[in-house]
Amino acid sequence: LAKLPDPPGWVTETIVIWSRFPSRKGILDLSNRQLTQVPKEIFRLRNIEALCFAKNKLTGISDEFGSFKESSSTLKEIDCSENEISFVASSLERLTSLQTLKLAHNQLLTIPSCIKSL
């Protein structure tokens, strides 16, 4: 497997700053940043209520999103609108606190069954 490129420095800095305040809750907005993948460091963060990845170049919602079940039971919203998403991993159904998943203006041809259970 080819190694994926590291996220831009500002992404890493944002995540490091967020990590320094473990009791912090809120929105992590990484919209309109030309991201082609979600930085893996995101999945270690806690107390996130909303993640915004709108207007990037993401091609899918990976199995790693299911790992938020262990680290952040407060995640209520994910906005991945206006990307290039063509697949959604079934692990998303593990996010029992998730109330809103925005996927408008992507390349999904069908509604994945894991979304129906949200």
Image: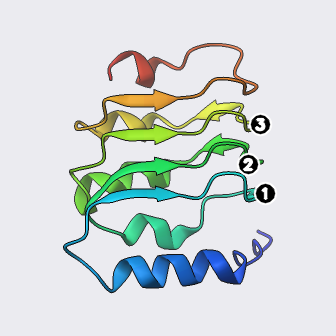
Residue positioned 22% across, 50% down in the render = 74
Q: Which residue is mark 3?
A: 84
Q: Which residue is mark 2?
A: 56
**Callout 3: few (<14), some (14-19), or many (20+) C-alpha neighbours within 10 Å?**
some
Residue positioned 24% across, 77% down in the render = 22
Mark 3: which amino acid? Glu
User: Quarter of the image holding residue 24?
Assistant: bottom left
Q: Disc 2 and disc 3: Cα gap in Å?
A: 8 Å
Is tag 2's residue or tag 3's residue first in the polypeptide sequence? 2
Residue positioned 48% across, 76% down in the render = 15
Q: On the rendered structure, is 73 left or right of 88?
A: left
Residue 34's label in the rendered image is 1
Residue 107's label in the rendered image is none
User: Quarter of the image holding residue 27?
Assistant: bottom left
Above or below: residue 75 compared with residue 105: below
Contact between labelled residues 3 and 2, with CB atoms less than 8 Å apart: no
